[in-house]
Image (cartoon, rainbow, N blue to C red):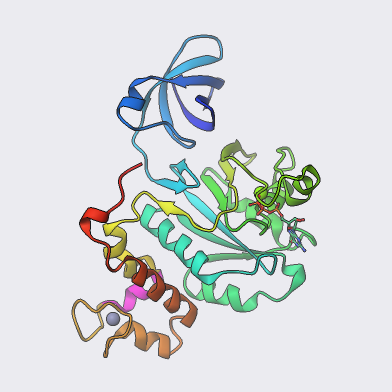
Amino acid sequence: MEGIIIKAISGFYYVKTEAGIFECKARGVFRKENISPIVGDRVVFSKTNEDKGIVEEILPRKNCLVRPLIANLDKLFIVSAYENPAPNALLIDRLIAICEMAEIEPVLIFNKSDLGDFSGWASIYKNAGFKVYTVSCKSGENVEEIKSEFKNCTCAFAGNSGVGKSSILSRLLPEISFATGEVSRKLGRGRHTTRTVELFVNSYGGLVADTPGFASVENDKFDLSFKENLPFLFREFVPFLNGCRFTGCSHTAEKGCAVIEAVENGKISKSRFESYVALYNEVKDLKPWEAKRKN
Ligand SMILES: Nc1nc2c(ncn2[C@@H]2O[C@H](COP(=O)(O)OP(=O)(O)OP(=O)(O)O)[C@@H](O)[C@H]2O)c(=O)[nH]1
Ligand SMILES: [Mg+2]
Ligand SMILES: [Zn+2]
């Protein structure tokens, strides 16, 4: 039988199929091959019981994020808040670049609009070519509009702890319970409220995951190809990349750089450019032998 892993807990994999959810163990062979099934994987399993089975094969992954560990995403909602915590442009732009590399569609959500004006942030990302939702879970502003993004796709919510990922999901999918900040403070669990990654079947024919807040997301391709592709991972840079004076222009400081010129003319935002330079400096000295191992 075939299905999708929607939850993984201490060696058990919960596989969703058209015939319901099966609790599966994995074949020992995966450990030997140094690959383990993860949430989002499409797998082939053999039924051992009415609702139990053994995972026999992991079908090829379209993509795979490392933190949070999840495979085969179509869309990533990158959530920021007006404050507690305030938006972090480098984090947003890093997440976007990872999405572009993994062929995941990034969608930006600016939450807690009841606390202040997001128009500056929204216009940076709209101008760069992204879908942007400015919402407030508290007042309800625009939250429902996010639902239209759920149709027939596998998606996840990412962003720093406290930005309101679980709050948004609880509002959109009241039939599913997502732990939010307030609940956990009562339980005294500390800052990260959402602890594991789980895919939920939503009422729009798709799957959606809440993820624990994190300061960074990694892709299993955060390696040489990331380094080589970096300028292309900033989609609004692409029209300018052939216009530089020097071939091999790094688009960070060169004379005659068409990207820098576009920043000066206001066609590319300064903040996006600064994130590009910061990411470039992180990866520029990456050598082939330092490239990350596959998960
Ligand atoms: N003022 C205001 N507060 C909000 C809004 N949305 C969420 N909050 C509050 O922000 C806090 C954090 O919300 P969560 O939904 O738990 O945040 P999270 O992103 O899931 O956090 P982690 O699970 O730790 O990653 C809670 O106290 C919410 O009540 C909003 O639109 N406006
Ligand atoms: Mg949460
Ligand atoms: Zn250039």
Where in the figure is residue 203, as x and y percent of width and height?
Answer: 65, 39
- Quadrant occupied by the N terminus: top left
Q: Is residue 158 left or right of residue 288?
A: right
- Whether the magenta-drawn stretch holds residue 237 is answered as yes
- Work out whether 51 lies above or below 229: above
Front residue of this view, candidates 93 and 17:
93
Q: Is residue 109 left or right of residue 185?
A: left
Q: Is residue 262 left or right of residue 207?
A: left
Q: Residue at x 54, y 20 (%)?
A: 23
- Work out whether 33 lies above or below 151: above
Question: How many marks on residues?
Answer: 0
The stretch of residues the image draws in magenta is: 235-241
Front residue of this view, candidates 78 and 105:
78
Where in the figure is residue 141, as x and y percent of width and height?
Answer: 75, 63
Front residue of this view, candidates 261 and 254:
254
Residue 247, picture quadrant = bottom left
Dominant secondary structure (helix, strand or loop) of the stretch shown in magenta: helix
- Whether the magenta-drawn stretch holds residue 219 is answered as no
Where in the figure is residue 49, as x and y percent of width and height?
Answer: 52, 9
Q: Is residue 102 left or right of residue 67?
A: left
Where in the figure is residue 163, as x and y percent of width and height?
Answer: 66, 59
Q: Residue at x 19, y 83 (%)?
A: 246
Q: Quadrant of ligand 3?
A: bottom left
Q: Residue at x 46, y 56 (%)?
A: 105
Q: Residue furthest left?
A: 247
Q: Residue at x 70, y 55 (%)?
A: 144
Residue 99, picture quadrant = bottom left
- Work out whether 28 lies above or below 199: above
- Quadrant occupied by the C terminus: top left
